[in-house]
Amino acid sequence: MLVVKALQKSYGQGQGAVLDRASFHLPRGAFAALVGPSGSGKSTLLNLVGLLDGADSGEIVIDGMRVSSLSPTEAAWLRNRLIGFVFQSFHLLSRLTAWENAALPLFHRGVGRDERKSRALAMLDRVGLSDRACHRPEQLSGGQRQRVAIARALVGEPRLILADEPTGNLDRATGLQVMDLLRELNRDLGVTILMVTHDRDMARFCDRAIEMRDGRVQPLVEVG
Ligand SMILES: Nc1ncnc2c1ncn2[C@@H]1O[C@H](COP(=O)(O)OP(=O)(O)O)[C@@H](O)[C@H]1O
Ligand SMILES: [Mg+2]
């Protein structure tokens, strides 16, 4: 469902390759950990797969669609429909309530308010936050904020969830709960997840690991 072929990326002339022929593939419904030392290119790879940045060369295919080398407008349109993002620092909008935050991808699609609200509330319920729908981020704990972000990532029924250290700002117990939730959503909804983590305990929730070193992907390891 995700094919990454020989991605090459450097951040400027004379700079070394941050990604060096990075290649891997994920079947539909996979829950993959992207692991490797700091600076090995994990976030760069995630940004390229998330259509947030362009590669110098190589190919990305999501659900049979070749998504590398799109115009910025096409990339934005596809990103909104194909991909949900979860970040280490949540990236919620502080002036919006939990349900308004969760509904943002639908807002950007032009979905009307009533449908936005009902779908966001259903997703908040799914992540165990139905009683916090009208709270603002500052009134929520870290774990609750990350649940709102997960609801936002899923509300548009994307094919792929990309998560960059989603438990990095959470204490251990809360982090494990968030991993439990991601695993449950992966199983129940069948959504494919690619998650950067440097924490072995968190990677254990995944069914495979993609290991990066110096911009290259090491052979795929099945762990589950
Ligand atoms: N926007 C950028 N401009 C220049 N260099 C960057 C940029 N982003 C990342 N890098 C460099 O690319 C390399 C890989 O970074 P990154 O993908 O963030 O690795 P990781 O997420 O594995 O820690 C690092 O050497 C980093 O300094
Ligand atoms: Mg990183």
Image (cartoon, grey):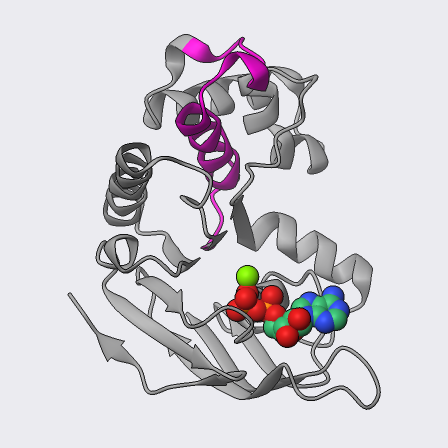
Identify the image quadrant of the N terminus: bottom left
220 horizontally vs 2: left or right: left
Q: Can you name the residue that lies furthest to the left here?
A: 224
**Image x and y of residue 20, in percent:** 58, 89
- Residue 163 among those drawn in magenta: no
Question: Of 105 and 131, which appears nearest the observer?
Answer: 131
Question: Of 180 and 106, which appears nearest the observer?
Answer: 180
Ligand 2 is found in which quarter of the picture? bottom right
- Residue 158 among those drawn in magenta: yes
User: Which residue occupies 63% across, 81% down?
Assistant: 18
Q: Can you name the residue that lies furthest to the right here?
A: 13
68 horizontally vs 148: left or right: right
User: Which residue occupies 50% across, 24% down?
Assistant: 120
Q: Can residue 5 be seen from the camera position used here?
A: yes
| Numbered circles on residues, count | 0
**Image x and y of residue 104, in percent:** 64, 31
Q: Quadrant of residue 90?
A: top right
Q: Quadrant of residue 130?
A: top left
Q: Which residues are magenta?
A: 132-161
